Amino acid sequence: GLLGVPQLTKAITTAPETALRFFTPVMRTADGYRVELELPDGVTADDVVTKRETLASNLKRNLGQVWPSHDAGKHPGRLVLFVADQELADRPQRWPLASRGSTNLFEPQVIGVSAQGDPVSVTLMFESFLVGAVPRMGKTAFLRILALVSVLDKRAEVHIFDLKGGSDFLALEPVANVITGDLADEEDDVLERSLAVLSKLQVEQRRRYRLMKTLDRSLAPDAKVTSDLADMADMGLHPIVLIVDECHEWFEHPD
């Protein structure tokens, strides 16, 4: 009853030895311990996930060490519990491209690590992100990772609009079109400058749509730009990446 999930409490009270079914033993991993459990009827993994703080208290571990989750490939009653030796912030992992290497935006690229310390990858091509959080939680830091992944594809045309101003993206000026300004300065026209670039990108988008309609299906079988097409400089179908920090400033603009 310590988790406050009534169906779980009832099952454990009624049949303590069979209420939880262990699909795996408690296993040692590189950074902690992991176990897979099947929960009683009427209890889902999400019921336990929402009680993570209470679970951490019961296990006498810091909140950043206790990570219950649902295995997306299994039914909702399958719980995966990972208890780390240290909090994630205390076991940083080096980005594989920190010193050398290149990327292909049409292929998965590492952008972070999971609570278990496993690499988290995403294919940026054809994806969009809306990043939100309370202040000081790393929104801009995450955007910088996406920007770095993007500029490491030598074909990519990268535009970065820093609508709040500052210096977060200035280091990327040699390899990207960085527009930044100071919204506290009434004379600054950062919004107008960024919208002008956005208008040009819309024109380019329409050009690409028209071009794709004329291509032989063997070049684009799914009517999408491929990595091979992006390699053809004469086509002008290279990846274009747009990153906007503090995009809400646009929403207040009359245009």
Image (cartoon, helix red, strand yellow):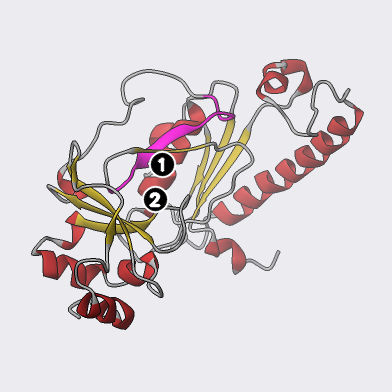
Q: Observer-nearest residue: 29 or 202?
A: 29
Q: Residue at x 36, y 47 (%)?
A: 141
* Quarter of the figure with the C terminus: bottom right
Secondary element at image label 1 = helix
Q: Percent x, y for residue 247?
A: 54, 58
Q: In the displayed structure, does residue 31 sit left or right of residue 135?
A: left
Give me the disc on residue 144.
Answer: 1
Q: Would you call the spot at circle 2 few (<14 residues within 10 Å), some (14-19), or many (20 or more)?
A: some
51 in magenta: no
Judged from this view, the residue extending furthest toward the right is 214
Q: Residue at x 72, y 16 (%)?
A: 232
Q: Percent x, y for residue 43?
A: 37, 72
Q: Which residues are magenta?
A: 104-115
Q: In the image, what residue type sits under mark 1?
A: Arg
Q: Quick check: can you spot residue 20?
A: yes
In the picture, residue 230 is in which quadrant? Answer: top right
Above or below, 9 relative to 32: below
* Quarter of the figure with the N terminus: bottom left
Q: Residue at x 76, y 40 (%)?
A: 205
- Report how far apart the C-alphas of labels 2 and 1 lie in the structure: 6 Å
Residue at image mark 2 = 140
105 in magenta: yes
